[in-house]
Amino acid sequence: MTLWKRIGGWAVQNVGQAAIGYVGRRGSAVLTRRATTRQAFTIVLPSTVYIYGTRCRVTIIPCPGDQVILDSEVAGALQPSLTVEQDADGIYIIAKPKRIANALTQIEFTLTMPPDVRVVAQLTAGEVILSDLSGTLEIPPRR
């Protein structure tokens, strides 16, 4: 084995391990940065909550009244994007991590809302947790 091959092998092994260690430390440090918010929306029934999200966890809690309360917690590299808007048809929630930091992002939110509100969710690698379900739940076939 030539001297250059040995030097190259040493550099790849040691510099590569140092870079992985640095990324691991930076990734965990970035994940500890969290932003939490609470938003309340007054609605008129019938109303719909539309959710479009990537790598997010949604918890739905029924509660009588005329308000939808959104508690959100986002954490991750390059601060993930959470956009919430309301119009006459309903409430729109768009939760997306930055593309480059997809694996280091966590988006969680809890919706406390009247049980008569319709929910339409389009999630990519996400979870929906339904609390205190009473009634019919229809889930279309997965594509």
Image (tube, rainbow, N blue to C red):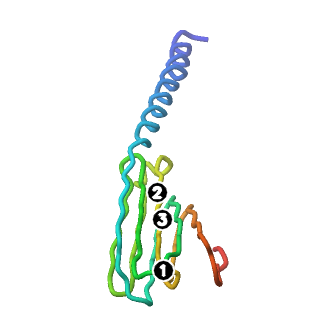
- Element type at marker 3? strand
Q: Secondary structure at mark 2?
A: strand
Q: Nearer the N terminus, badge 3 or badge 1?
A: 1
Give the crowd class for mark 3: few <14, some 14-19, many >=20 residues within 10 Å.
Answer: some
Q: Which residue is identified by label 2?
A: 107
Which residue is label 3 attached to? 110
Q: Nearer the viewer, mark 3 or mark 2?
A: 3
**Amino acid found under the numbered disc labelled 3:** Thr
What secondary structure is marked by label 1? Answer: loop
Q: Quadrant of the N terminus?
A: top right
Q: Which residue: 51% across, 79% down?
A: 119
Three-letter residue code for mark 1: Pro
Q: Residue at x 52, y 74 (%)?
A: 121
Mark earlier in primary sequence (1, 2) = 1
Is there a contact, CB below 8 Å, between mark 3 and mark 2?
Answer: no
The quadrant holding residue 129 is bottom right
How many other residues sit within 10 Å of disc 2, few (<14), some (14-19) or many (≥20)? Answer: many
Residue 37 at x, y = what percent?
35, 59
Nearest the viewer among 16 and 139 is: 139
Q: Are marks 3 and 1 in contact (CB under 8 Å)?
A: no
Amino acid type at circle 2 is Ile
Q: Report the front residue among 53 and 18.
A: 53
- Please, which residue is most extreme toward the bottom here? 46
Percent x, y for residue 16?
50, 26
Residue where numbered disc 1 is placed: 64
Does 73 appear above or below 83? above
Residue sticking out furthest to the front: 64
Percent x, y of residue 122: 52, 72
Position of the C terminus, as image quadrant, is bottom right
